[in-house]
Image (spheres, rainbow, N blue to C red):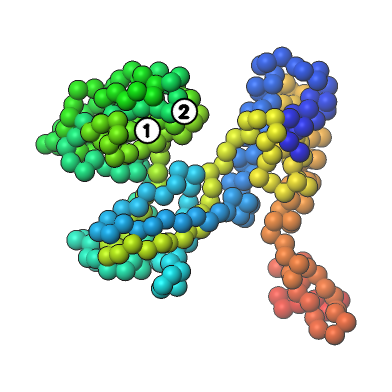
């Protein structure tokens, strides 16, 4: 089901017009997206968000800023030439084992969390902002640390595709925060020294701020190599009429049923309890679909005489079911 079809199903079942007022449409869309996020964040269901990407290491640079679409790393590995998996360690472990970050071939990665920039200024610098769209004319804000450890903040009105310096400071050594007052129309980029200097961060279209999931490689890379990593994608809201949920198509109606529950609750409609029962039954089926495997389903006795695995629960024999 598309986003529009889900909305239309809700309108019909809640006895609303096919084209309700703007406030109702906005509310229903919010309910659908809340249910979408709730389902995709459930344990086991997060596999629907799994993806794999790559990056290349930089010599003498342990810090890696991974794509903004990422919410959590599941694994990291290097296929050529080493063909091994990197193990995850904590920052405390790294500081205890090797504070100076010796160089070599990385065998561990250390998650540091989210940061606003993919790179920090290489030295004390002014920072500039620009956009790929002339329509980006809102205010940009930056906070960070200046030479001498001074905490600084500055703001500047953007001039679209023409780069402009943010504030008057020219001694930024660390950028801690970057955001704009209105959603980006184009891709907004932060640069060091000038509008064509090193790109430090990018605010995606429709967003207010950038964020990158940062990891440290250990040992610090001594050569350029390509790494792959499995990760969970960010849950994106359904926006356009043709958008479809990340869920299996057989369970798209969970969003419709769940949003109807929310609407009935909002309107104090007695049909809430009926929708709740319907949702509970469908959700149970969905959970079995996600967690069940064909090899784990009940097979009382196969043609070969072997005993199949049982999924009847903890009160039944753990090794199988004789029938």
> Is 157 left or right of 147, judged from the image as shown?
right
As measured in the structure, the alpha-carbon distance from the residue carrying label 1 to the one carrying label 2 is: 10 Å
Measured as percent of width and height from the top left, residue 279 is found at 76, 41
> In the image, what residue occupies the spot 45% across and 19% down?
135
Residue shown at the point (71%, 14%) measured from the top left: 21
| Residue furthest out toward the top | 21
- How packed mark 1 is, by other alpha carbons closer than 10 Å (few <14, some 14-19, many 20 or more), is many
What x and y, as percent, mark residue 157? 33, 18
Residue highlighted by disc 1: 189
Q: Are marks 1 and 2 in contact (CB under 8 Å)?
A: no
From the viewer's perspective, is residue 79 above or below residue 214? below
Camera-nearest residue between 157 and 291: 157
State the image coordinates of residue 164 (x, y, percent, origin top left).
29, 23
Residue at 19% over, 61% down: 100
Tell me if I can see residue 102 in this picture.
yes
**Secondary element type, mark 2:** loop
The answer, for residue 43, to whether it is visible in the render is: no
Instruction: Give the side of residue 112 with respect to residue 2, left or right.
Output: left
Q: Which residue is mark 2?
A: 186
Q: Residue at x 72, y 49 (%)?
A: 248
């Amino acid at each position: 089901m598309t986003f529009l079809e889900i909305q239309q199903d809700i309108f019909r079942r809640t006895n609303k017009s096919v084209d309700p007022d703007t406030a109702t449409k906005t509310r229903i869309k919010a309910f659908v997206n809340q249910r979408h996020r709730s389902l995709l964040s459930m344990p086991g269901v997060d596999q629907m968000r799994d993806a794999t990407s790559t990056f290349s290491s930089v010599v003498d640079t342990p810090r890696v800023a991974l794509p903004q679409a990422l919410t959590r790393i599941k694994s990291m590995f290097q296929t050529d030439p080493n063909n091994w998996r990197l193990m995850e360690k904590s920052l405390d472990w790294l500081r205890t084992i090797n504070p100076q970050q010796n160089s070599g071939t990385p065998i561990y990665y250390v998650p540091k969390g989210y940061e606003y920039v993919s790179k920090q200024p290489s030295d004390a610098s002014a920072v500039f902002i620009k956009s790929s769209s002339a329509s980006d004319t809102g205010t940009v804000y930056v906070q960070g640390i200046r030479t001498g450890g001074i905490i600084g903040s500055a703001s500047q009105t953007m001039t679209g595709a023409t780069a402009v310096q943010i504030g008057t400071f020219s001694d930024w050594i660390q950028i801690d925060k970057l955001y704009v007052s209105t959603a980006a129309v184009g891709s907004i980029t932060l640069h060091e020294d000038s509008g064509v200097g090193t790109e430090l961060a990018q605010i995606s279209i429709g967003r207010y701020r950038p964020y990158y999931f940062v990891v440290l490689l250990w040992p610090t890379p001594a050569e350029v190599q390509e790494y792959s990593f499995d990760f969970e994608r960010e849950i994106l809201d359904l926006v356009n009429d043709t958008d479809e949920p990340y869920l299996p198509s057989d369970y798209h109606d969970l969003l419709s049923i769940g949003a109807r529950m929310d609407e009935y609750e909002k309107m104090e409609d007695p049909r809430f309890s009926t929708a709740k029962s319907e949702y509970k039954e469908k959700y149970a089926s969905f959970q079995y679909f996600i967690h069940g495997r064909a090899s784990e389903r009940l097979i009382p006795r196969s043609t070969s005489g072997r005993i199949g695995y049982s999924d009847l629960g903890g009160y039944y024999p753990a090794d199988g079911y004789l029938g």
